[in-house]
Amino acid sequence: MTTKHLSGKKSSYLPEVLSQQEVLELLRATRNLKHRAVLALIYSAGLRIGEVLNLELHHIDVDRRQLLVKNAKGRKDRNVILAESFLPLFGNYFGTYARKKYFVEGEGGNQYSSASVRAFLKQSCKRAGIKKRVTPHTLRHSFATHLMENGVGLRHIQELLGHARPETTMIYTHIAQKDLLNIQSPLDVAVNKFLNSDKKQENFMLSGNFKG
């Protein structure tokens, strides 16, 4: 995500993402079945909020575990994955709520509002103790970042997100921590060398008190 200052210089900002554990805690803290189904689908399929609100029932193919996203950004259709772990939740939701046309509906079968999604997402974050600023798009960012950390290629992620240009998807190479997690801090290297040396001290802990 790149913006320009008044001086004309570009400044890059990395989008906020949740950890996989935070996503699970968020879903667990979402007590309403409909709300949980919406948030789980946004994250598990990497959908934009407009895409989940416009998703029609006949575009959900449970047998092939795919969703057809119609008229997405750039007026393009695309297929996205339907998570295996989402199916039991979907089955429970499908059997509990009667819907006419859309995956999620408001009163009278009308389309659900994005404001409502943002409101219950905020409540769930509060219950889960998540202090980050989380929006529905944060779940989409998290989906892409976690895919990259799991070794999925950039081209596949671009297709799943529906990005027209690979440059848009490249932002997630700066957020994903797969390679960073394999890098040791020089402090860790120094402490490990000390503990493995002949001068090893019993019960050495960096958090202990130092003698001055």
Image: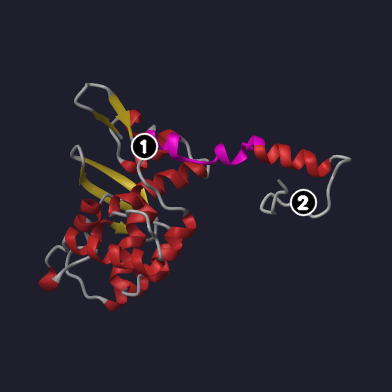
Asked whether 179 or 157 is in front, the reply is: 179
Q: Mark 1 points at which residue?
A: 158
Outermost residue, bottom side: 96
Depicted 149 relative to depicted 21: above or below? above
Depicted 15 relative to depicted 57: above or below? above
Left or right: where does residue 148 sit relative to residue 57?
Answer: right
Type of the residue with mark 1: Gln
In terms of sequence position, does the residue under pointer 1 or pointer 2 come before the other? 1
Task: Write down the region rendered in magenta.
Answer: 171-186
- Display coloring: secondary structure
- Identify the residue shown where x is 29% and y is 54%: 135
- Identify the residue shown where x is 79% and y is 55%: 203
Labels 1, 2: front one: 2
Q: Mark 2 points at which residue?
A: 204
| Residue 179: % across, % down | 56, 37
Depicted 13 relative to depicted 200: above or below? above
Left or right: where does residue 73 sit relative to residue 146?
Answer: left
Q: What kind of element bears circle 2?
A: loop
- Identify the residue shown where x is 65% and y is 35%: 186
| Residue 103: % across, % down | 24, 63
Gap between marks 1 and 2, in whole Å? 48 Å
Type of the residue with mark 2: Phe
- Identify the residue shown where x is 29% and y is 63%: 122
Outermost residue, front side: 212
